[in-house]
């Protein structure tokens, strides 16, 4: 994989979008790079489980081979195209880390993080669930609802991840704090410590959003993936309470902006094409329909049901 780690991505033109920067090279498909990165994370996590700790070599391998794939994928101007590629279709634990890495890095770029901060965020997102290596497979792979005791054990993955990461030399404290805090919520209803607002690390706030978005977007042993627009709708409803509203609004706004020009179906089964997104209320788009322009801000009872293409 070393030879491919620095190979530029090709993102094929789809739906009118393409990546045209000079670093794009033909015949290297982004989904292949993402799949390879997921396999690499599987190997790394298996090594960590076997050793019982994270070696500095594991961190360097992620930085050298996995992080470049995540960073290049996050540069895709049409994140909707990547939506299908980022879904965890198998071996959720490993695909999830790559998907969260891409989403968090994409969001970090849009938030204007410095290069050093962005690199730290990518590493933090990729390792946010590393503590799950200490959770029983019978719990991780259980198809039904966890018992109360099993759920309490599952929640310990945040503490385990922090313990694995906190003493590794040369990495920023935010890496371990993200593993610990990515299930904390703005209203104090998260875990493991019930932190609120400013007590939660900034990178953990970003990864929390990426984590939930990717989880809802993926098939799991206990639920089917939600449609793209339904995921955005659900996260938008959580803007005040669970997540940092400034970060989440930026995320939803950016995601919705990639849908301009795409055809959608409304809850009343009418078809329209998105022509403009309201930056302050991204879900209430301006649509072009067969009968004219429709402003969803004025149509309180109707909303977008699904994206057609």
Image (tube, rainbow, N blue to C red):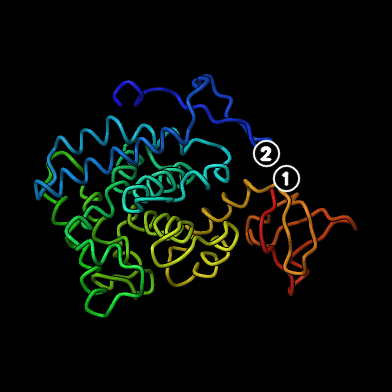
**Residue marked by disc 2:** 15
Image location of residue 235, percent across then percent down: 51, 64
**Residue marked by disc 1:** 261
In primary-sequence order, the first of circles 1 and 2 is 2
Name the residue at 34% across, 26% down.
5
* Residue 116 numbered tag: none
Q: Are marks 1 and 2 in contact (CB under 8 Å)?
A: yes
Badge 2 marks a residue whose secondary structure is loop
Name the residue at 27% across, 79% down.
147
Q: Answer left or right for 183 relative to 244.
A: left
* Position above or below: 86 against 207: above
Badge 1 marks a residue whose secondary structure is loop
Report crowding for label 2: few under 14, some 14 to 19, many 20 or more residues within 10 A (C-alpha).
few
Image location of residue 9, percent across then percent down: 47, 27
Q: CA distance from mark 1 to mark 2?
A: 9 Å
Image location of residue 35, percent across then percent down: 39, 38
* Position above or below: 118 against 254: above
Q: Would you identify the image quadrant in which residue 135 lies?
A: bottom left
Name the residue at 23% across, 40% down.
43
Q: Would you identify the image quadrant in which residue 118 lies?
A: top left
> Residue lying farthest right?
291
> Residue lying farthest bottom?
148
Q: Locate the N terminus and report the quarter of the image it occupies.
A: top left
Task: Report the mark closest to the observer, 1 or 2.
Answer: 2
Report crowding for label 1: few under 14, some 14 to 19, many 20 or more residues within 10 A (C-alpha).
some
Most foreground residue, 269 or 208: 269
Q: Would you identify the image quadrant in which residue 305 lies?
A: bottom right
Image location of residue 127, percent across then percent down: 27, 48
Q: Answer left or right for 296 relative to 218.
A: right
């Amino acid at each position: 994989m070393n030879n491919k780690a620095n190979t530029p991505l090709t993102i094929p033109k789809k739906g009118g979008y393409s990546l045209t920067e000079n670093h794009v090279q033909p015949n290297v498909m982004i989904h292949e790079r993402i799949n390879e990165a997921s396999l690499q994370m599987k190997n790394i996590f298996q090594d960590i489980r076997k050793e019982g700790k994270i070696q500095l070599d594991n961190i360097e391998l992620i930085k050298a081979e996995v992080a470049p794939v995540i960073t290049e994928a996050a540069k895709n101007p049409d994140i909707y195209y990547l939506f299908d590629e980022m879904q965890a279709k198998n071996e959720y634990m490993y695909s999830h880390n790559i998907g969260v890495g891409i989403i968090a890095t994409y969001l970090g770029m849009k938030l204007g993080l410095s290069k050093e901060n962005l690199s730290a965020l990518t590493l933090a997102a990729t390792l946010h669930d590393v503590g799950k290596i200490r959770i029983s497979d019978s719990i991780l792979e259980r198809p039904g609802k966890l018992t109360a005791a099993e759920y309490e054990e599952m929640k310990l993955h945040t503490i385990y991840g922090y313990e694995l990461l906190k003493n590794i030399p040369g990495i920023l404290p935010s890496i371990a704090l993200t593993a610990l805090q990515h299930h904390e919520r703005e209203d104090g209803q998260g875990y493991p410590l019930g932190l609120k607002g400013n007590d939660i690390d900034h990178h953990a706030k970003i990864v929390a959003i990426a984590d939930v978005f990717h989880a809802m977007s993926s098939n799991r042993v206990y639920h089917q993936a939600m449609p793209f627009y339904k995921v955005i709708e659900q996260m938008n409803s959580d803007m005040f309470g669970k997540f940092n509203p400034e970060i989440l609004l930026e995320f939803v706004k950016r995601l919705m902006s990639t849908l301009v020009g795409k055809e959608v179906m409304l809850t009343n089964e009418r078809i329209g094409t998105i022509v403009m997104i309201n930056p302050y209320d991204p879900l209430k788009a301006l649509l072009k329909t067969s009968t004219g322009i429709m402003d969803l801000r004025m149509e309180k009872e109707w909303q977008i049901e699904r994206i057609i293409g």
